[in-house]
Image: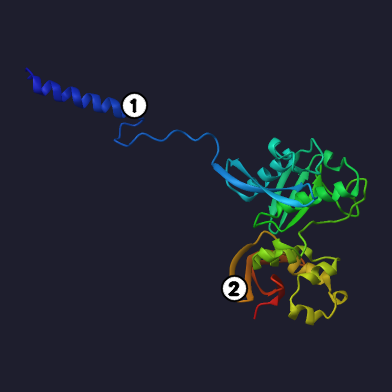
Amino acid sequence: MGFNKKTVLIALVISLLVLGAGCWGGGDGETPPDDPPNGSAGTAEVTVYFFNGEGELVPVVREVALDEDTPENRLRAAVDELLKGPAAEEADRLYSQIPENVELLGVEISRPYATLDFSAELEQMGGTTRVFGTLDQLTWTATTLDEVSGLILEVEGERVGTDEHLFTGEGVLFDRLYRPAAGDWAREASPAKCLETFLVTIGPNVEEMWSWMGPRARELYGTPENIDWTALAEDLGSWRDYEVVEEIIRDDVATVTIKGDRVVEGTPEPDAAYPARMVREDGIWKWDLRAD
């Protein structure tokens, strides 16, 4: 059976279309895919802290690549940038107190704490100015994350700053690190961030706890010396790996609700919730007992 020229031409066009579709990987009529990713999920901005010529901590924003955008990956990227020190074009106005050749070995976040594990070089420095400068840089960098308000340091897997392992030859004791209840950062912080910072201050330094307490709480305890911090540590201080599920602000009063599984004195409390009453005093949100 013969074919006319028109039939042959149509068949040739159809063949070319099918062949072209096959080259896109499937021949199902779908448009060709975009270029494959370059190995990262994208970029993100992180904030690190260096010192300026006046000895003040200043924030510096860095753009980093992330394989997956998680709090742990953001924190790891931020600390890696911090360990690199100021860029060449910043060296005339910024500097770091952190020793050279320090390696970040591990990152773990269990809200409100982050645990950072470093190589032994972190402790190879002397002088109180440099030691406390290093601690401040690490603390302020870590606590830029919403999920982190307190920092725990480890060196080669061992927790430092404790009675069992004082930090560096200066013998510094801190157990955990956090930002103070003062300065512009505290006035700009949300009720949730202030609540979480109060949670990480719960401990023997009752004066620091007192600075995060509102008028109701201060009236309840009377003086810092009357605070039973061990009881608070077993209750509020035991919250870990929770979510902030609600933050309601009405003028100078706010309610912040955290929720998660917790264990209090060995007793599991699954899906527990705690609504905290926060009041704004001198521009800073402070813990003022449980919300009504």
Residue 40 spot, x, y in % from top left: 55, 38
Q: Quadrant of residue 264?
A: bottom right
Q: Relative to 45, is 287 on the left or the right?
A: right
Residue placed at 76% from the left, 49% from the top? 138
In this picture the colour scheme is rainbow
Badge 2 density bin: few <14, some 14–19, many ≥20, Cα 10 Å: some
Residue furthest out toward the top:
2
Q: Relative to 268, is 130 on the left or the right?
A: right
Q: Mark 2 highlights which residue?
A: 249
Badge 1 density bin: few <14, some 14–19, many ≥20, Cα 10 Å: few
Residue placed at 41% from the left, 35% from the top? 34
If you read the primary sequence from the N terminus, does the residue marked by circle 1 or circle 2 appear first? 1
**Element under label 2?**
strand
Q: Tell whether label 2 touches label 1 (CB within 8 Å).
A: no
Front of the two marks 1 and 2: 2
Q: Mark 1 highlights which residue?
A: 23
Residue placed at 65% from the left, 66% from the top? 192
